Image: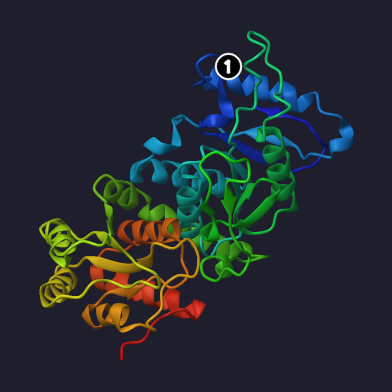
Amino acid sequence: MPSSVMLKNLPDPIQLIYAGGTFGSYGRPLAPLSAEVFLPTLQKLLSAQDSTSNLPTVSWLENTLIKDSSQLTPSDFTHFYQLLLNAYTKGDRRFVLITGTDTLSYLGAFLAEAFAGSDICIVLTASMRPLLDSEILHSYNIDEHSDAWGNLNNSLKLAAAGESGVKISFGGESWPAQTVQKIHSHDLMAFTGHSRAAYPANSYIKNLPDTRRQHWLDDQQDLLSIIKARAENASVHALYCLPNDVSMINNQLQALLSQPPCGIILLGFGSGNIPYSAALAETLNLAHERGHMVISASQCPFGGVSDSYAAGSWQYEHHVIAGGRLTIPAIYARLLWLLLRYDSPARRRQRWLNNVNQTGTSIKKR
């Protein structure tokens, strides 16, 4: 397979990574094409584009992990982190990653956390419909009704600009990765986000001196083997509040106490309201003592949590950390990265609170 397609005579080609998903599905019934079939087809289609499209030089970064994004695990997230880190170490700086929509926002937010403090440029994209038209079998043509080609072109142009940070490009828009969430299960405008992002988006360096970049890379490479090992057992749980007796959520939380320190997301009502009981308060204290990080989040897609209501504020007296305006994918991603990156519950908690304080969304104890 050829390694690159010269769409424009520019140095520093964009590294394109194909990781599966609807984007590369084809046939009846739809099924993902193998990389050996799909990538040469995509290369041919890119090469055939009119020169007026002004697309940059594209090279393919070999990736062995191609699967439906709903099947991704923490170890898979670290696979993409390592793949990108190794290429970044070799001097590549601009990347486009094609994956599936199910965990697009989760993977994007994780990579944003993992590469904080660098000057890497990563754009993730996907599609709601396959790139290739399955009405014309055995002849690979772009489906004119698909969103895939437009999403890819927009992502390549965004990566060509080279702005540091991790972004998601979809449906003609782009946002900092940790602000993005999927809001529709099948519409082409399936994602939304916003540009008022704080950490980790504000940690990326526009012009990073070579010495500082090398120090950053050395730190990441030194911890890579540890991060990969921790990913095999890392876990983040979500407890969804429903109008049930409070003993149900308490029992769910208690069932996690015997596990090694993990991340726990409490999905409360409205602005983070959680039903109170003395037993649940004590269980939250025990969770903290045993090294678990419990984060309060809202079931609402927008707005986040606050301490305006007594029905929610009580939990912050029992070591629960407010998720602020972070989305559920962003909370998951930050919890996972802290579990992988830091070796003690105290350091993880300190790091979270330091990061949240940078955003101005922390909730103080009363």
Q: Residue at x 68, y 52 (%)?
A: 173
Q: Residue at x 44, y 37 (%)?
A: 69
Q: Would you name the residue on which mark 1 appears? A: 37
Residue 79 in which image quadrant: top left
The picture places residue 128, in percent across and down from the top left corner, at 58, 36
Residue situated furthest top in the rendering: 138
Residue 361 lies, with reference to residue 224, above or below; the image says: below
- The answer to whether residue 2 is visible is no
In the image, taking residue 132 as reference, residue 260 lies left or right, namely left
**Which colour style is shown?**
rainbow
Q: Secondary structure at mark 1?
A: helix
The picture places residue 228, in percent across and down from the top left corner, at 33, 46
Q: Residue at x 15, y 60 (%)?
A: 248
In the image, taking residue 121 as reference, residue 285 lies left or right, namely left
In the image, taking residue 262 as reference, residue 95 lies left or right, namely right
Q: Residue at x 72, y 38 (%)?
A: 150
Please state which of residues 191 and 330 is positioned toward the viewer in this rendering.
191
Which corner quadrant holds the C terminus? bottom left
Task: Count numbered badges in the picture.
Answer: 1
Which corner quadrant holds the N terminus? top right
Residue 102 lies, with reference to residue 210, above or below; the image says: above
Q: Amino acid at mark 1?
A: Val
